[in-house]
Image: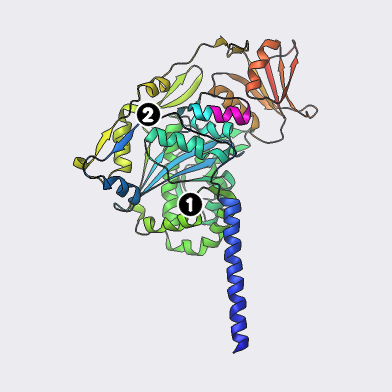
Amino acid sequence: MNKLIKTGIIICIIIAGIVGLGVWAYNEVVYTPHGDMVVDNFAAEPLFSYEEIVEPQHVEEANTINKTVAVFGTDLDGYITDTILVVNINSITNKIKVVSIPRDTKVEWTSAQQSALENRRGFSVSSTKINEMTAYAGIDNIKDFTVKQIEMLLGIEIDNYVVVSLSAFKDVVDAVGGVEMYVPVDMYYVDSYQGLYIDLEEGLQLLDGDKAEMLVRYRSYPTGDVQRIAVQQEFLQAFAKTVLSPSIVTKIPELVSVFFTSVRTDATIGEIFSYYDYVKGIDISDITFQTLPGEGQYIGAVSYFIPDIDNMASFVRDIFFEHLPDDEFQLAYTDIDEVHELVENEAQEDVVYYDDGVLIDKTVSIQVLNGTGVGGAASVAKDILEADGYVVDNIDTYNEQAQSITQINVRDFDYARQFKAYYPVSLIRVDETLEYDVQIVLH
């Protein structure tokens, strides 16, 4: 009997140790409540605010029955949020509604965000594409930057966020045994700078992790990102069907392994378990997909997605407040004239002088060379510069002797100082024989 008791105690200790190790690993690796920046106060209001005009308890009720999660898929290097989804789970309607936010959506940084970036990185920006915010602020600061912008745009509160790396995305698809889907067109694209090689044939097929990556990253459609988002949504529908199938039970250990190694979130373990009550009664037919209303537009030389502010209110109403009767709900706009002016601003002049005498000339020809040894770094730098109105004429790999610091090589010294905002730790070198006005060699 004593032996049996001792054995039971040992088993309990082992189980407690395993659980404790799991909790520790989750808190150390997965749980990411905040980053390395301090954003004291967001000096901006949401584009919309919503208030119930019949019963005050509806406000609390709406928060209780809705769970809203922002899901981000990063690029290969983990700098940029290539895929942005807002997932709303409603326990009254038993529906999951997924909203895709185009990666090129133009956002205006709040003064608090600009100050935080200036204090931490030594430079700041005023507007970018939404997917580039983490390239500037860092992926660990996504809650105070990208998530906050989504809340401002939609006028809602995001309960939690999840960041899935590209490698994790592929691992998850492999872990569930692949996803069956009809590939709508032949897909072929090569970008050696990003290490991206896409080669898929049209037709029904079982996509493993590598092929699923090709599908969701392919962009060479006639309508560009609009069709890309539609295909991504079709994939997510097929993925959901796979995950909700009974056979998924046998895949749980592999999925847990991927989750603990390649996913970041600000959700505590308790919050994760609480989501079960919201999704336990949901069927595949209850999952729908929408895209943020708006349209593509060039501002200067940069292509943006501009949200349709006029139709945003009804869009948000249908997605997040469907459970409320029309006669018990009223949309109340905040004063957003100033925000409209910012969002719809046309490109500034190409050349201006700041008070400190730094020349800002966005007509210069630019070459970016990748000397980091990390694939796709030059492409990321190109996207960041072009988001601010520059045009990068060429990106390539730096094949000469390795450098110990980023170099800004220029024909004219006056051209160089404006790029110190992007590369504060860098060396300026004047070379009048350069093919381009500015050559940036990344280290």
The verdict on residue 123 being magenta is yes
What residue span does the magenta drawing correspond to? Answer: 115-125
Q: Is residue 414 left or right of residue 126?
A: right
Residue at the location (28% across, 32% down)?
A: 332
23 relative to 72, above or below: below
Residue 179 is tagged as 1
Question: Where does residue 168 sit, x and y in percent of width and height?
Answer: 57, 49
Which of the two labelled residues, at mark 2 and mark 1, occupies the earlier sequence position?
1
For the C terminus, the quadrant is top right
The verdict on residue 21 being magenta is no
Residue at the location (41% across, 33% down)?
A: 152
The three-letter code of the residue at mark 2 reads Gly
Residue 18 is tagged as none
Which residue position holds label 2? 294
Task: Label 2, secondary structure: give it.
Answer: strand
The crowding category of the residue bearing disc 2, from other C-alpha atoms within 10 Å (few below 14, some 14 to 19, many at least 20), is some
Q: Specify whether residue 31 is in view.
A: yes
